[in-house]
Image (tube, rainbow, N blue to C red):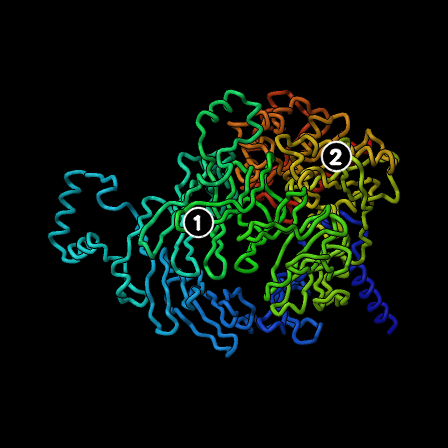
Amino acid sequence: MKKYLLFLLLCTSEYTFAQQIGPLTVEKIMRDPKWMGTAPSNFRWTADSKTLYFNWNPDNKAKEDLYKIAGTSTKPVKAVEKEDEKLLALNYVYNKDQSAGLVEKNGDIYLQNFKTKKETRLTNTLERESNPVFLVNGNVVYQLGDNLFEINLKSAETIQLTNFVKGKKAGKAETKSGTEQDKWLKAEQTALFDIIKKRNAESRTGTRGGRGRFGALSADSKSLKELYTEDKFLNGVIISPDGRYITYKLTTPAPNNHNTIVPNYVTASGYTEDIPGRTKVGENENYSQGFIYDTQRDTVYAIQTSSIPGIKDLPDYLKDYPKELDTLKKKNADRPVNLFGPLWNENGTTGIVIATSQDNKDRWILKLEASTGKFSLVDRQRDEAWIGGPGISGFYQGNTGWMDNNRFYYQSEATGYSHLYVVNISTGAKKQLTSGKWEVQSVQLSIDKNTFYFKANKEHPGITNFFKMSVDGGQPIQITTMKGLNDITLSPDEKYLAISYSYLNKPGELYLQPNKAGAKAIKVTASTTTEFNSYKWREPDMVTFKNRYGADVYARVYKSEKPHPNHPAVVFVHGAGYLQNVHFGWSTYFREFMFNNLLADNGYTVIDIDYTGSSGYGRDHRTGIYRHMGGKDLTDQVDGVKLLVQKYGVNPKHVGLYGGSYGGFITLMAMFNESDVFASGAALRSVTDWAHYNHGYTSNILNEPFNDPIAYKRSSPIYFADKLKGNLLMAHGMVDVNVHFQDIVRISQRFIELGKDNWELAVYPVEDHGFLEPSSWTDEYKRILKLYENTLKK
């Protein structure tokens, strides 16, 4: 009996030990992240707001399961997959009094009557119908293929509204005569087949392609105007609510561009296979032109971008290139723009278009005079660096919309921080609704259009909370109060909040809270494992310091309780450039968070800095790297080291740094241009030459290589490779389709030609930009730790 009890005790002890992580090692923290536990995600409410569904994996299975919180319960229950899919809240397009809604499901259009709770299927085809909207008259319009169709809900008649035709109109198109053989074959086909004769006749009379939704030609569609798309791509087909105007864009693909290729060496076939890649910065961009089809006048005309105020204004950086500036001034050309919209008000009297210049310097909010295709100015944001910030980005229409038939809301960095504005389109009067040295990060207009709900970092740059305020302005009312990051999914009836909340050393969990100020948030999930919880993860010191330019810079510091006698330090540099990592929530860099704890356990002091160019701190911080990456963003790392020396007792001769992507780029620049500060560095998946990165990101900050070579030469590490003094480790995935492996190969060749021997390169044959395999993460971070142990402790 005693032996049996001893056996049970040993088994229990072994099980308990297995659940304790003990001393941190690279092998332990770089395992498949499921060892930590999986946070809940993908929150969605049912339309009646009574049930919340989410994905979760509390049992550490191979994949997540579907869970739900139902009724007044706060206990998660495993749901039957897709059991209530039809009840989930959908993105309905509402009619004027919100008594009915339209939605696309699986390529068909459905009409929901919210009063009777009756759903009617309007289409049932193998093809996809999409983009349903209500017209002012109550009819429904949707898109099938390239064309718009209108359903009269009273008569059930379907009418085709547009007749887009690929190619050019006969007689105006550039025809190719072809060979004598081609002509003979064409004539033979016509002579042999009646169907060819019929289709040729239909083409000449303009009747072909005008078939109604259910196969019959409606009386109106037989004579539909042919809208030729030529050799361009058709997109952005939008109808005004009164049904009169149909706007669309024709996009000409960028000519003569070179797409990159990423070779894949470890393949199932045994052969090297090519992965198609992106273009590089400075390549030609697609060109789009907008058109308006006036159905009343049965005429088509171009949208007049030349009427945009400031369309010919040139950017200030061209002053560094006098000859080129003089040439452009003489040319006096309109700058190419991207158009989003129009966004029509409810009664269809006014359409708003968001326009962004392709040189990234302007964003206009414009009123479209639909009868002429001309614009009048509502608001213009000009930034000699680049247009950006929360809710403003130049790649989409931003956080914008109609509050009623006269008032339109949008965000602007006019004060240096992204805030919420309202403009009366009729009078031109503008009103700023929020203000202060903080950012509005997301906006949602209430169902009754009387309230704005928004997420903002009002309390601290690294703390987000949920607020509400009247559409007329006033003091924002704070709804959530938990210190950290609060991401909100609002229930359809706007009575409840599903909160994904995380803290510095606590991964995200689901909380539920009534949508009221002062209400208590109830924790619903507990996702972290016993093993993860067995270690006391640090709450890093949240500090600020003044950089050499007098600006406030925020940082996390991981203190070591038992510093090594050399008092070494490591700087972690987050990636993405425009990203925030010094916040009070759980970091997306969770592996690096754990590695920083490991370093602190082994006698290092670690600092993680939201350097110039990081998000969350307003316009000046965001654009402080314009035309010089590796400038203020690098000197902020150096100034952070001074803080460690002065306040944490770090030895300035024993400092290293590491980071991936943009962090890898900064690591290279630091090892080249601040070699007296950094003894060693690990540069992971690094950009080494910005002229080889993508267009969307790089052209914002550095313009383009052919028109601003100064910016590229002072921002690209490859031009400073000769200055390498300390010990450098580089690591890169060979199938990286973001920062190509070519980047690291090119700088390696520079080191070889320069005779440098204090560097090494670790390559990962199966890894893309973000590593997936635990073995790769483990190998990479064992090398980083070895680098520091050999260079900062000896």
Residue beneath label 2, please? 637
Residue situated in front as seen by the camera: 271 or 281: 281
| Location of residue 465 with respect to 9 vertically, above or below | above
Badge 2 crowding class, 10 Å Cα cut-off, few under 14, some 14 to 19, many 20 or more, is: many
What's the CA distance linking mark 1 and mark 2? Answer: 51 Å
Name the kind of residue labelled 1 in the image. Answer: Glu
Residue 278 in view in this figure:
yes
Residue 781 location in percent, x, y?
70, 42
Badge 1 crowding class, 10 Å Cα cut-off, few under 14, some 14 to 19, many 20 or more, is: some
Residue situated in front as seen by the camera: 720 or 255: 255
Question: Do the numbered discs 1 and 2 sit on residues whose CB atoms are within 8 Å?
Answer: no
Residue 367 location in percent, x, y?
49, 49
Q: Residue at x 73, y 31 (%)?
A: 635
Q: Residue at x 45, y 59 (%)?
A: 348
Q: Residue furthest bottom?
A: 116
Residue beneath label 1, please? 369
Residue 379 location in percent, x, y?
56, 45
Q: Earlier in the sequence, mark 1 or mark 2?
A: 1
Residue situated in front as seen by the camera: 384 or 524: 384
- For numbered disc 2, what is the local secondary structure? helix
Q: Residue at x 19, y 39 (%)?
A: 178
In this view, the mark in front (1 or 2): 1
Name the kind of residue labelled 2 in the image. Answer: Gln
Q: Residue furthest left?
A: 191
User: Is residue 758 left or right of 297 when viewed as pictured?
Assistant: right
| Quarter containing the N terminus | bottom right
- For numbered disc 1, what is the local secondary structure? strand
| Location of residue 132 with respect to 695 vertically, above or below | below
User: Is residue 500 left or right of 566 when viewed as pictured?
Assistant: left
| Quarter containing the C terminus | top right
